[in-house]
Image (tube, grey):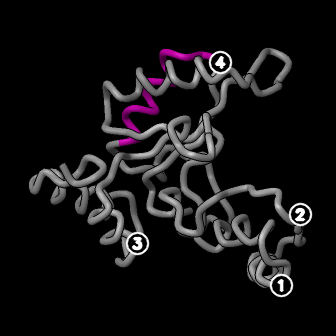
């Protein structure tokens, strides 16, 4: 099954840009108590999550498109963005898990993971966002590169990698285009 056949989301590493995939792979070797929760996220599923706390009719619309039950909860945001780097193979959600299976919510552990992964790829950590998302890691793409990826029909991680390589040549990879 290709990444684009995923109805909601997947945790498959092959559904990540190679730039991020390598950093996640190295992290999984170093940190034994992590779980890769999400890599690629279908844009329709992203919209389903986004509208799940904002507009009940829009949420129902996307739930119907996906064949899911609506789970509307006014004000309980599951995501703060309608356009996610997950849908262009450039973001991953990783969680630390205790032996009993519960998620460990210690920001310092997630920051340590960010520092480790940043040795292998230029990434941004969700712990730096206004609305903290400690388990979220994404490629540090410039706004120009993001726009190109979101506006194009890049349907594979390899296609995204080609755009990123072009951005690297122009030195517009790091966030802000510097």
Asked if labels 4 and 2 touch by Cβ distance under 8 angstroms, the answer is no
> Real-space Cα distance between discs 1 and 4?
39 Å
Which structural element holds mark 4? loop
Front position in the image: 176 or 84: 176
Q: Is residue 17 above or below residue 123?
A: below
* Residue under label 1: 57
Main SS type for the magenta part?
helix
User: Quadrant where the N terminus lies?
Assistant: bottom right
Residue 52 in the image, given as x and y percentages of width and height? 79, 68
**Quadrant in the rendering for residue 50:** bottom right
Residue 150 disc label: 3
**Dot 3: what SS?**
helix
Quarter occupied by residue 72: bottom right
**Contact (CB < 8 A) between labels 2 and 1?**
no
Q: Are marks 1 and 3 in contact (CB under 8 Å)?
A: no
Q: Which residues are magenta?
A: 20-33
Q: Residues within 10 Å of mark 2 (few under 14, many from 20)?
A: some
Question: How far is mark 3 from mark 2, CA to CA?
Answer: 28 Å
**Residue 95: which quarter of the image?**
top right
User: Between marks 1 and 3, how big is the CA–CA gap?
Assistant: 25 Å
Residue most toward the front?
130
Residue position marked by numbered label 4 in the rendering: 33
Cα distance in 3D space between marks 2 and 4 = 31 Å
Residue 132 is a magenta residue: no
Answer left or right for 93 relative to 141: right
- The residue tagged with tag 2: helix, strand or loop? loop
Residue 105 location in percent, x, y?
72, 25
């Amino acid at each position: 099954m290709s990444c684009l056949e995923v109805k909601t989301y997947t945790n498959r590493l092959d559904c990540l840009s190679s730039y991020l995939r390598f950093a996640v792979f190295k992290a999984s070797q170093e940190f034994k108590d992590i779980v890769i929760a999400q890599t690629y996220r279908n844009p329709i599923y992203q919209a389903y999550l986004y509208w799940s706390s904002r507009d009940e009719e829009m949420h129902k619309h996307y739930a119907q498109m996906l064949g899911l039950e609506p789970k509307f909860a006014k004000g309980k945001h599951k995501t703060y963005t309608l356009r996610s780097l997950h849908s262009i193979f450039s973001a991953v959600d990783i969680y630390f898990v205790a032996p009993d299976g519960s998620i460990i919510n210690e920001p310092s552990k997630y920051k340590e993971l960010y520092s480790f992964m940043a040795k292998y790829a230029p990434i941004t950590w969700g712990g730096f966002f206004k609305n903290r998302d400690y388990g979220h890691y994404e490629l540090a793409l410039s706004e120009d590169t993001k726009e190109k990826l979101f506006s194009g029909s890049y349907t594979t991680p390899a296609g995204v990698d080609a755009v990123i390589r072009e951005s690297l040549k122009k030195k517009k990879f790091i966030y802000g285009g510097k």
